[in-house]
Image: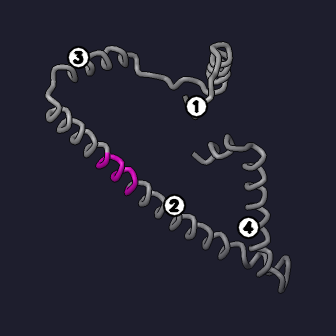
Amino acid sequence: MNNDEPVMDSSLAQALDGVLKRTLPAPTLPLDFHTRLNAAIRRSSTMVPAEQRAILEREYQAQLAELRQGYVRLRWRTLGTLIGAAFASGVAVALALPWLHATFGDIAVFAVPLAAMIFALVVGIRTWSLGVDGLRLFR
């Protein structure tokens, strides 16, 4: 009997299950999840496979349309954010450049990119130090 799957005793399996339960929290379910699940199981046992396929296809198309709408909204929101940030940056530089030129003289042109680089480094280091949870700061 040539079997590629490793044999695992029940105590090891239970220990692994326990570690997984502690490591990966179970997702929260809606309050009526079990009721809806049982109703779906009852409906599926009475339907013809062609009906099931049609229902699944409609659900898939609806989910795909929702996903596409979300993607388009995200693209527009991202474009708006980029345009707004570029405009705000341009206004800030236009207002600050006379003061920077008076303060720093001829090297004022280098002060703006240097300040932007320092800001980006601070944000990057802060995000890196927080790990994946740091990305939640930008949501």
Which amino acid, by three-letter code, is at mark 3? Arg
- Element assignment for label 4: helix
Q: Which residue is mark 2?
A: 81
Task: Out of 11 and 15, give the one closest to the viewer.
Answer: 11
The earlier-in-sequence mark between 2 and 1 is 1
**Residue 15: horizontal and vertical position, in percent?**
68, 17
- Quadrant that contains the C terminus: top right
**Residues at badges 3 and 2 in contact (C-beta under 8 Å)?**
no
What element does badge 2 sit on? helix
Quadrant position of the N terminus in the picture: top right
Q: Which residue is mark 3?
A: 42
* Local secondary structure at mark 1: loop
Q: Nearer the viewer, residue 113 or 24?
A: 24
Q: Earlier in the sequence, mark 3 or mark 4?
A: 3
Residue underneath mark 1: 5
| Sequence-earlier tag: 4 or 2 | 2
Amino acid of disc 1: Glu
Q: Which residue is mark 4?
A: 116
